[in-house]
Amino acid sequence: MARSVTSKITRRIFHRQLVGTVAGVAAATGISAQESHAAGAIRGEPTAEKTGLEILAGGGNAVDAVVGAALVAAVVVPHQTGIGGYGGHATLAVENGRRITSLDFNSLAPAAMKPDVFPLDSSGKVIGQKNMYGWLAAGVPGILAGLQLALNRYGTKPFREVIQPAMGLARDGFPFASAAAALRGATKQLAADPGSQGLYFRDGKPLEASDRYSNSDVARLLESLAKDNSVDSFYRGEIAQRIAAAFAKNGGLVTTADLAAYRAREVEPLKMSWGDYTIYPAPLTAGGATIIEALSLLKELNWADRDPTAADTTQLQVEAFRQAWQDRLELLGDPQHSNVPLPRLLDPATIRAEAAKIESTVAARQPLPVRVTTRPDQGTIHLSAADKSGNLAALTLTHGGSFGARVTVPDLGLTLGHGMSRFDPHPGHANSPGPHKRPLHNMCPTIVTKNGRAIFAVGARGGRKIPNAGAEVLLQLVARGQSLPDAVAAPRMHTEGTLAVNLERAWPAGHLEELKKRGYDATVAASATVSAVGLANDGGQFVAAMR
């Protein structure tokens, strides 16, 4: 395969340019990067970070810290996630970083969920947005089960201890802050739901950023779980009965049997090597397959050796991401319920063939054909943690969109995530709804090792922008060899398989206009927010960055 190899002079010039670009991006976007405490590091959400660092300073490991932080995040950013959020994934480096594993706590569709549960109008859209908002949009919430599984298998602290900060915040309250802006965009649905109105409105008006917010119902729920030192009653006890009763009353499908059947599970992460590095993202139904496919194509295209200042190099990356996204949206789903051709998609022969097509289309300065349509979504938190023993944790948890399904279980304070919106509503698709299926989602918690040693935990929040943002940072780390702060600060792109391409404002000059000339709908737009931690050097220091 032909390749355009960069001269050493060009690479040195680009490195100087990139350092300037990184500094500019950092100044413009408020990147958070610093050496962290001797006990470890954690990034993802400010209040949650404080809890995680306190747990690390108190002798907890990275898993203890990330679970405690996740519980706090589930209280303090109710628009992004919550105890009733639909679920998440985690990838962990445990046993002092020697073993990599993943946890799947994605939402589970109820037994009564049918492929045609969301009727479509003549334009192919779900009638009444019932997959997005309301009780049909919610499946079994997986977050608590996932956090309990992580703690039981790989933590050192009891659940009753790590839940205390979240319980106190729910009871005592905190400024509503950034949730207020999200609330303004969700007012219509939340105001129509009695449980949500009681939480997020005062005197009929939505809460403002300066208002103090508390959730006494969730505080009591957490107190109950703390007494049991377990989340079991949420799925198979009195709390489960109350959740199922709310679904039944409001036309939802989740039953006590569905809740009792739910299990978070430990799964094998995906894996690919690039030089001395090995990348371990969470597997299906998480977004790691899309990262692996895109990176595999770029590795085959010798992307790291090409002139990074050339528009052709940018187009190669655009087409690799487009190919991975088109395969994602057409072919991927729950492998336990659908025939997902992932082995074929990642087979070296397939990668070589698709890379050759990309090479040809870039040489012709035109895009490959479009096969898919797309839609936006938001509403997630990612936390990355490291400890002094070499353990790393990358954990993502979500409502889905802002305030999820925008319904709340009365007297429990549980705003529910809209996991069922992650299904493709067209029957017959690999990711169409079905009984006890897990929907394809965007979360991509990832661990990176170098020469067998776990060194980075990476993940992002930002809906469909998550996989590409994670892949961009991983490219800078493993292909360019950048430091973690520089990799997080570097400009990013986004595409979901169509001709629409977003470049961040700091992308090399002229590439946006060149992509337009080549047939893309190229615009300037922000990326997802990546939060990552890692080992800064062999001396045991930590570094953390978020942008």
Image (cartoon, rainbow, N blue to C red):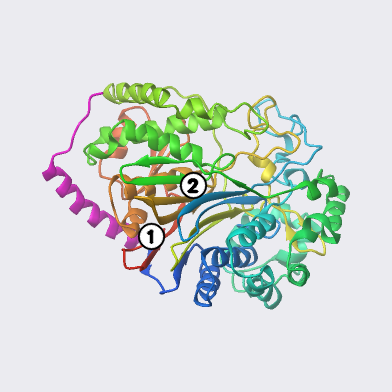
Which quarter shows the N terminus? top left
Quarter-wise, where is residue 304 in the image? top left
Q: Tag 1: residue type? A: Thr
Determine the residue located farthest toward the left in the rendered image: 9
10 Å crowding of disc 2: few (<14), some (14-19), many (20+) = many
Q: Is residue 116 above or below residue 402?
A: above
In magenta segment, residue 24? yes
Tell me: 297 left or right of 416: left
Residue position marked by numbered label 2 in the rendering: 466
* Main SS, magenta residues: helix
Quarter-wise, where is residue 338 in the image? top right
Q: Position of residue 131 (x, y in %)?
A: 71, 40
Name the residue: 28% across, 50% down. Answer: 481
Q: Disc number at residue 29?
A: 1
Name the residue: 17% across, 38% down. Answer: 6
Name the residue: 42% across, 50% down. Answer: 526
In magenta segment, residue 13? yes
Q: Is residue 528 above or below residue 292?
A: below
Tell me: 452 left or right of 166: left
Q: Position of residue 274 (x, y in %)?
A: 34, 41
Which residues are the magenta region?
A: 1-30
Q: Position of residue 118 (x, y in %)?
A: 74, 34
Q: Disc number at residue 252?
A: none
